[in-house]
Image (cartoon, helix red, strand yellow):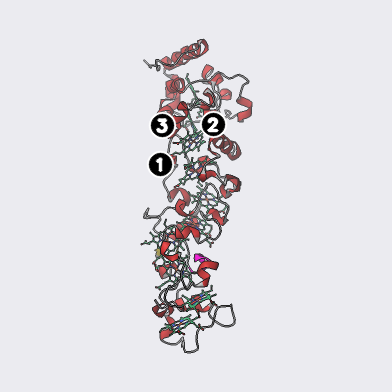
Amino acid sequence: MHKMRPSRALSLSSLILMCVALAVVATGKPQDAAQAGQNPPQSGNNPPSAQSAPQATPIDAETCKLCHEDNYNSWSASPHWKTTLDKRGGPLMQGCETCHAPAAEHVANPGEPSKFPFTFDKASPKDINARCLSCHASGAEAMHVTESVHRLSDVSCVSCHSIHHAEDKEFLLAKPQPELCYTCHAQQRAQFNMPFHHRVNEHLVRCSDCHNPHGTVGEHQLRASATQSVVCYKCHEDKQGPFVFEHEPVKTEGCVMCHTPHGGPNPHMLKTSNVNLLCLSCHTTSFSNAPGAPSFHNQAAQYQACTLCHTQIHGSNFSSVFFK
Ligand code: HEC
Ligand code: HEC
Ligand code: HEC
Ligand code: HEC
Ligand code: HEC
Ligand code: HEC
Ligand code: HEC
Ligand code: HEC
Ligand code: HEC
Ligand code: HEC
């Protein structure tokens, strides 16, 4: 009833395993068990080291399919199917056992919880990360996994990714962004609900446009190197310059000196409700190296709305006081 791929050479031992498998399938037991998978075995979680028998017989995914068809189907529809094409690591680095560890003993004795392969629901974050990183420790995205705040805080790969039950098939995310992130970052949900915000909830901008959840060298897992403002230039190129007349803090302090990056109550996501308060926090002779606003700037009247006149506040090629 289950066709094997004709090209697959079956060893004697796997034939025996197949017979066991088919016999159990014929009784209908494991299918029922799999469907009733809601009650996971109580004592089945072995650390991976305890399971790797010296010379484990590789089991190919087609065999697992006999009893775990749903898991097989979700796997074969995902990019992990591609491991079957990469012969370099040998058969144990292909198919199901890449993640679940050698499972020959399990196949020979499927109902026995102590022989279950590596299961993720009861494994430690460290063990889970190690397992996934055996293939995913390289590449631009994973460059700084060792510094990852998530990893150091015991947030494992499967806190965000699901191999068999991904709601967002792109990148196998357990849930789509931003809901995924909000499950743990409630404060940020509140920020993106503020009147002025980056349209993350509207799916125009993603958390991962600015953050790399796998870790970065910089603070806050921001996708930036030297200054925090770099990540902003990705989309706000016009603010980068270089300008003939730079407004110094844009370059030295970065965008978050004046803006809240997520969202807030003030127009343009400014940190203060009135622009003049923001400007005067620096442009008073006593507080910084910025020149004080000229004395004719009477704050009782028209000089409050600083950017009405100083319009090019991020820098200008024409006016040293950013008029145009
Ligand atoms: C002969 C049928 C059979 C075969 C073949 C088989 N399994 Fe299982 N497997 C079972 C049964 C029965 C259980 C226990 C009931 C359950 O949780 O689904 C189980 C449990 C598991 C579990 C633990 C599930 C949990 O809820 O904790 C994993 C993981 C697993 N199998 C993976 C595999 C992999 C990987 C293969 C192939 C290498 C494989 N199985 C081959 C029958 C089988
Ligand atoms: C890339 C790693 C990976 C591969 C490859 C993989 N699994 Fe899983 N498996 C997981 C993870 C992680 C879970 C925990 C549930 C989840 O995240 O979807 C899991 C859960 C399971 C379970 C428990 C029931 C469930 O759905 O939670 C079974 C059974 C299982 N896998 C069987 C298989 C079989 C059969 C294959 C091959 C066809 C396979 N797995 C390939 C990572 C993997
Ligand atoms: C805090 C959540 C989170 C954690 C923890 C996490 N990821 Fe991701 N991962 C994501 C998101 C979100 C994306 C999509 C990134 C994007 O939009 O560019 C992603 C993308 C990926 C990709 C595809 C992107 C690529 O080109 O590399 C891989 C592979 C990946 N993650 C592996 C892992 C592994 C392995 C771990 C554990 C060491 C892990 N992830 C931990 C959230 C997470
Ligand atoms: C045996 C090696 C191997 C292991 C172990 C492995 N993966 Fe993968 N993973 C791959 C390959 C190969 C791809 C496909 C890459 C491609 O498409 O170029 C992939 C793709 C992915 C992607 C990207 C999906 C997409 O849509 O682009 C994510 C996310 C991912 N893996 C997460 C994980 C997680 C989480 C684990 C641990 C539970 C894990 N992987 C374990 C080899 C592995
Ligand atoms: C437009 C870019 C951008 C987007 C989109 C973004 N962030 Fe941020 N995030 C930042 C910057 C910049 C900081 C650093 C703020 C600072 O230095 O004051 C930060 C800081 C954080 C912090 C650290 C605590 C804090 O608030 O300062 C967390 C946690 C965080 N972001 C989570 C998220 C989540 C979750 C999402 C999606 C729902 C998200 N971010 C979307 C740019 C962004
Ligand atoms: C399973 C829970 C969980 C999920 C899901 C999660 N995070 Fe986190 N995140 C944490 C924990 C725990 C920390 C470390 C403690 C802290 O700073 O809050 C953290 C830290 C961070 C930080 C660094 C904060 C700092 O000040 O350095 C950023 C940025 C961040 N997460 C972004 C994200 C994004 C983006 C997503 C979604 C793709 C996400 N997180 C999903 C739990 C989670
Ligand atoms: C992934 C692209 C992207 C990145 C990265 C990004 N932005 Fe934006 N930003 C946008 C878009 C799109 C808008 C337009 C807002 C809208 O119409 O919803 C916007 C609007 C703004 C606004 C204007 C809001 C208004 O009311 O006029 C400010 C201020 C802003 N971003 C600051 C920042 C800062 C600071 C950073 C870096 C922390 C940043 N942006 C990073 C895409 C991005
Ligand atoms: C010295 C304070 C300050 C700094 C630093 C700053 N901004 Fe602004 N930004 C403002 C003010 C004030 C406004 C409102 C301008 C107005 O009222 O016309 C604004 C408006 C904006 C707007 C919306 C209007 C427009 O011009 O497009 C964007 C987008 C923006 N800033 C992005 C950035 C980015 C990106 C950075 C970092 C490179 C940055 N800002 C750094 C003060 C600042
Ligand atoms: C974080 C501190 C800071 C904030 C906030 C700030 N500035 Fe500045 N500003 C400076 C510094 C420093 C200089 C450069 C002084 C120099 O070149 O000697 C400067 C230069 C200027 C100049 C040019 C002065 C000259 O003679 O070249 C003007 C005009 C100006 N700022 C207006 C504003 C306005 C309007 C705001 C509010 C939207 C503002 N600044 C917010 C620090 C700040
Ligand atoms: C009605 C238009 C107008 C408004 C509003 C305005 N300014 Fe000015 N600002 C000027 C003019 C005119 C000059 C002088 C330009 C020159 O010297 O060529 C000036 C010069 C400056 C300078 C440069 C002083 C120096 O010594 O080089 C600073 C700093 C400055 N303004 C800050 C502010 C701040 C802060 C606000 C808001 C509280 C503000 N301005 C509001 C018109 C305005």
x 46%, y 64%: residue:
240
Does the Cβ of the disc 3 residue fall within 8 Å of ligand 2? yes
Q: Does dot 3 land on a helix, a strand or a loop?
A: helix
N-terminal of the pair, mark 3 or mark 2, is 3
Observer-nearest of 312 and 75: 312
Counting labels gives 3
N-terminal of the pair, mark 3 or mark 1, is 3
**Tag 1: amino acid:** Glu
Q: Which residues are magenta?
A: 254-258
Badge 3 is on which residue?
A: 74
Q: What is the spatial separation of the Cα atoms under label 3 and label 2, in whole angstroms? A: 17 Å
Observer-nearest of 191 and 293: 293
Tell us which disc is closer to us: 3 or 2. 3
Badge 1 is on which residue?
A: 170
Does the Cβ of the disc 1 residue fall within 8 Å of ligand 4? yes
**Location of residue 288 with respect to 31 vertically, above or below:** below
Q: Position of residue 278 (x, y in %)?
A: 49, 75
Q: Does the magenta-highlighted stretch encompass residue 256?
A: yes
Q: Position of residue 138 (x, y in %)?
A: 54, 40
Residue 98, numbered label: none
Which corner quadrant holds the N terminus?
top left
**Tag 2: amino acid:** Thr
Q: Is residue 144 left or right of residue 83?
A: right
Q: Are marks 2 and 1 in contact (CB under 8 Å)?
A: no
Q: Position of residue 19 (x, y in %)?
A: 46, 12
**Location of residue 232 with respect to 149 vertically, above or below:** below
